[in-house]
Amino acid sequence: MNNRKIPVGILGATGSVGQKFIELLSNHPWFEITELAASERSAGKKYKDAANWFSSSPLPDSVAGLLIKNCEPNLNCKIVFSGLDSDIAGEIEQTFAKAGYIVVSNSKNHRMDKDVPLLVPEINGEHLNLIKYQKYNGGCIVTNPNCSTIGLVLALKPLLDSFGIETVNVVTMQALSGAGYPGVSSLDTIDNVIPFISGEEEKMQTEPLKILGDLNSGEVKFNDIKISAQCNRVSVVDGHTECVQVKLKKKTSTKDIIETWKNFKSEPQRLNLPLAPVNPIYYFDEPKYPQPRIHRNLDKGMAVSVGRLREDSLFDYKFVVLSHNTIRGAAGGAILCAELMKAKGYLD
Amino acid sequence: MNNRKIPVGILGATGSVGQKFIELLSNHPWFEITELAASERSAGKKYKDAANWFSSSPLPDSVAGLLIKNCEPNLNCKIVFSGLDSDIAGEIEQTFAKAGYIVVSNSKNHRMDKDVPLLVPEINGEHLNLIKYQKYNGGCIVTNPNCSTIGLVLALKPLLDSFGIETVNVVTMQALSGAGYPGVSSLDTIDNVIPFISGEEEKMQTEPLKILGDLNSGEVKFNDIKISAQCNRVSVVDGHTECVQVKLKKKTSTKDIIETWKNFKSEPQRLNLPLAPVNPIYYFDEPKYPQPRIHRNLDKGMAVSVGRLREDSLFDYKFVVLSHNTIRGAAGGAILCAELMKAKGYLD
Amino acid sequence: MNNRKIPVGILGATGSVGQKFIELLSNHPWFEITELAASERSAGKKYKDAANWFSSSPLPDSVAGLLIKNCEPNLNCKIVFSGLDSDIAGEIEQTFAKAGYIVVSNSKNHRMDKDVPLLVPEINGEHLNLIKYQKYNGGCIVTNPNCSTIGLVLALKPLLDSFGIETVNVVTMQALSGAGYPGVSSLDTIDNVIPFISGEEEKMQTEPLKILGDLNSGEVKFNDIKISAQCNRVSVVDGHTECVQVKLKKKTSTKDIIETWKNFKSEPQRLNLPLAPVNPIYYFDEPKYPQPRIHRNLDKGMAVSVGRLREDSLFDYKFVVLSHNTIRGAAGGAILCAELMKAKGYLD
Amino acid sequence: MNNRKIPVGILGATGSVGQKFIELLSNHPWFEITELAASERSAGKKYKDAANWFSSSPLPDSVAGLLIKNCEPNLNCKIVFSGLDSDIAGEIEQTFAKAGYIVVSNSKNHRMDKDVPLLVPEINGEHLNLIKYQKYNGGCIVTNPNCSTIGLVLALKPLLDSFGIETVNVVTMQALSGAGYPGVSSLDTIDNVIPFISGEEEKMQTEPLKILGDLNSGEVKFNDIKISAQCNRVSVVDGHTECVQVKLKKKTSTKDIIETWKNFKSEPQRLNLPLAPVNPIYYFDEPKYPQPRIHRNLDKGMAVSVGRLREDSLFDYKFVVLSHNTIRGAAGGAILCAELMKAKGYLD
């Protein structure tokens, strides 16, 4: 019995995040896709007929013939991964949690709820304790941060632990896939930069404070780092590049910071979770690196690439961070959350 | 006699900056291209045979048949515009100045020379006084700043005058044409960002201090603003986009700052110089603006577009600046310098 | 009174073709925009508030404040230019024609109607005679061909006249703007080619036969050239590039064909129509030309660029054709139709 | 002893084809890279120091520390894969063959030599018999076709066998990586198409005739298909897209042609060669497919994707072919040649 895979469902299965969930779960050693749910428009059709599959990995045969259901809590699975649009995700996810499902969501709706973990498994696995304060009967909601937040907090975490952080300044150059499909018009991105992404700067300025906060008698005490974010859309398929500046609490050196990044390992690595990167952070010495097209898929697309660490005249240090926005920053990150939950007994 | 145009020559005429000089000077009311000079390889050939003309404006007939000469000071003209590569520009430009030519250079070599104006006509026209300290017999050297510097200092100047500036933080997303032709490989820029441009950050951190400095008994006292710059190359043909943060000396409001930008006019506007933009700065209220493909050619490509002014938690304000890197930021900016010199009697 | 401009209206004024009409008509010597009409959603708003203006030419002040009306035949103008979507254009255009308006349409709906000219002013101006067979009281409908058809037929016309044409084979690489706004998703075009454009090949295979047909006692006798078309979408903003092969009826030489193209002038040139290109066709000897980014704006975007003429082993000759799809291929072409109508007395 | 891998060397190891050889050979079950050779400039350095590694697969550790040697026939290996530039490949490859090496070359120099196989393992494996007519002592030269030829001939082969082919017309939209690194300037490809690739059309018109020719008493009798090719460069990283038209000798139907493609298997599949695709040809029913970004990596990048088969008015049928130009079309194709040689005993 032990080698039976855990049945999982995907809410919003035809969307771009839903497709990435399917791609990453299709050969997963622990989880098996048994249910796909989407909007009325798709419900009742075979997945291959309803979805405009656009990944370069072929649509898995085991999924192609599955019938899409409505997003109602009568799915035959234990976990649901949610890639729902935020205009409907909030309520549907609650309905599933109340019906006893474990909801792992990539949507923003419940991220800042007091009793909902905003989880990055290498950073704040202990926030899973919040679940016991949730008012759902056996079900629960766990969330994944925004795609531009994840790379940033992973690069910050080792610095926070070793040197303390006072302020963070970040300017992003974000990939097109972050806007979903069809998302951004080609006429807006060819030979162009869009210096605005609605709601994105606010998320980058608040989510890290919860993720990097301390759990204290059932509450997350938000970190008091001051963060300023500026977000831009550039002509890149996948991979968010971020120019980061930090002011630290303790004096250190570029050499020590690089060591700290290279040595960083955490629970997912120790537990050898299937989708955990071997190293959460890779540092590159070549000044022209990291670059999205070259490094986004590093370590299954789950690692963060960092480079160009140098001293800064206004902060202490500046550097460049790159991470895959639809793998580490969305579906892959959410699956890693579920893997951590299983390894820590939350699925028993 | 008064309506005779002033004969001008172009050094490095076949390169990308040289071509832009030709394009912008071809119907100039005051200047007339009489001489083209380039490397040995091109010298002796007709321009149309030697140059790989890649502008979308057709090569002007008056220039197509001109014979390219060597970069030696026997050209029949009064002014030479230099678009030479920096590995040879330094010496050649001095040779021309010594021979009595007025050299207006887009190369970096003499920008930081004590007696050489680093000129942005809307900002520091009085720096032209430095010329009289130059040791050339009748000739002189005047320089134009780096392409990424110009947009920044034009946006800063009205703030400096009205509110004072303590610190400036800037992250750029720079166009491909800034690297010349052939410049950057297409394989490095399609679906990619390069988070490094050699030497660029240093220029952005030092050039503004000279440009915004005060002329005092024959010397420029550098401004003491503290600047930090991070420079990236993105997949855009023309137009550098910059995310800027400033800490001001006086309290103000976004409304007042926008007014200050909109009202900014300076000597080139008052003198009605041919290539002067009607307004040096345009402010856009739409949060998605400015964008390089839409706004780079505004007001003949000589204006700076600004948008997204908002308060910042780490500095006082943040905003986005866009300017055309090969027009305002190179050839057009240099021609405006020469126009200012003429209007102020430096060419008499 | 003679110098009063003719009042014109634009149907579908907020769409991408509508915007191009506004841009090209804003300083027109003969026409003046007095009316803008669009869908219910926009009607009643000022143009600047309703339209997402995305041209790099600033929105003309004279248009920004105009109130948008419904697409109903109570507009105060003589001509309406239609950039309506084809799902509604058919009926609305007829309603306007019946109400006495001169409708110049860029939509496909009435192009193949027996009594409607499918007009390219350099080619088949005499087809305007069809108007008298139209059953509208004083009003009429004149249409402009598909954007990929125009470049092709302009390049073919001189060959047809001089040598006769048996067969034409064409493979296109079409610009993004041809699909309107938002049109094609950026995720479908970055680092990609889409080898399919719905309905496009059929238009290219039939429209030229009507355009190049002879008017005979009130009917167009379609030309019997056999045409095969394959249409692709590539990552280009504006400008359709077409690889063309032709089998001619008479023997000739590349030299003679080039001469024929270079010498081609027609009615719009002789009548000196405002938007007529000086030369309808430019031939380039450099084998790497024409290219969309370099040549699309040639002669106000109204000329066709041709290059690479060479012998072919399967047909007689092959060559490359480039034309601006939203200027010559849409709004500009339609305006030229109206100009020809005025010059020939159809507006009196 | 049997499980010892065969030692192989790479000529031109630092170039773009050389890098692809390293990537594809780094975990090969039969071959092991023991030698890297390149120009004087790189010789003597460790590979990781000499090469500008730009693949998104990390540089294999086993190769990073290898010392680069000169391209002289004292390498410790049995096979050399050549990715040399054509201006030097011809002589060096002969020198190696004379010294007893098996040379598998991706360069064009010896492709049309009478006694040299121009090999596509699924098509003309029997051409390896030509080797015995080569005048080298134990060594030999085998070549791989041009990157744009391979996709075409693979799609044609089943049609030739089943229906016979009279004429082929092909228009390509080729990827940037086909020009090597740095290759094409970003300024030539962003928002652009280049309708010319030097020498490419000639190769596409002649190479298929040899590949599809019959071996007859030690000579290849060229096929007499008439081919016309037009080649364009578009803004795509990897993957050549080709619009193909064919005139067949026998009547057939789209259904039968699709069956013929789907059923096509050949020697590499039967021999289960490591790099052989499971199916050489995949046919897609969706009219928008194949697309380079989605399908180029299908079946390890070794398969050809075909779609849009439909009747044609000038030929019999038209369709779209896509193949990965640096895998199937270069390094991968050459390795498959070596695999076939091993399986057929040519390496014993």
Image (tube, coloured by chain):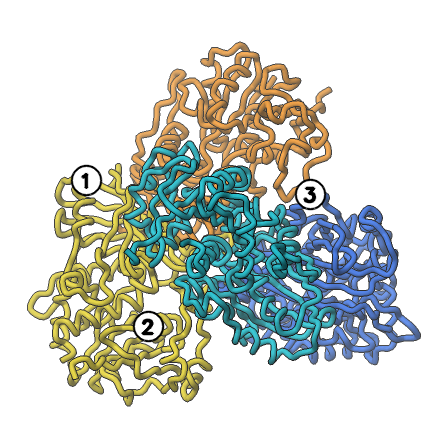
Chain colours: A blue, B cyan, C yellow, D orange
Above or below D165: residue D79: above
Is residue D327 shown to the viewer in this render?
no
Q: Secondary structure at mark 3?
A: loop
Q: Which mark is residue A296?
A: none
Crowd rating for badge 2 (residues with CA inside 10 Å; few <14, some 14–19, many 20+): many
Towards the viewer: B15 or D92:
B15
In the rendered view, tell whether residue B88 sits above or below residue B314. above
From the image, tell me which residue sits under label 3.
A286
Amino acid tagged 2: Phe
- Dot 1 corresponds to which residue? C255
Q: Position of residue D224 (x, y in %)?
A: 30, 30
Say which chain tag 2 marks. Answer: C
Q: Residues within 10 Å of mark 1 (few under 14, many from 20)?
A: few
In front of the other: label 1 or label 3?
Answer: 3
Q: Amino acid at mark 3?
A: Glu
User: Which chain is indicated by disc 3?
Assistant: A
Q: Which residue is mark 2?
A: C21
Confirm whether residue B330 shows in the render: yes
What amino acid is at disc 1? Lys
Evaluate if marks 2 and 3 touch, with contact meaning CB atoms under 8 Å apart. no
Upstream in sequence: badge 2 or badge 1: 2
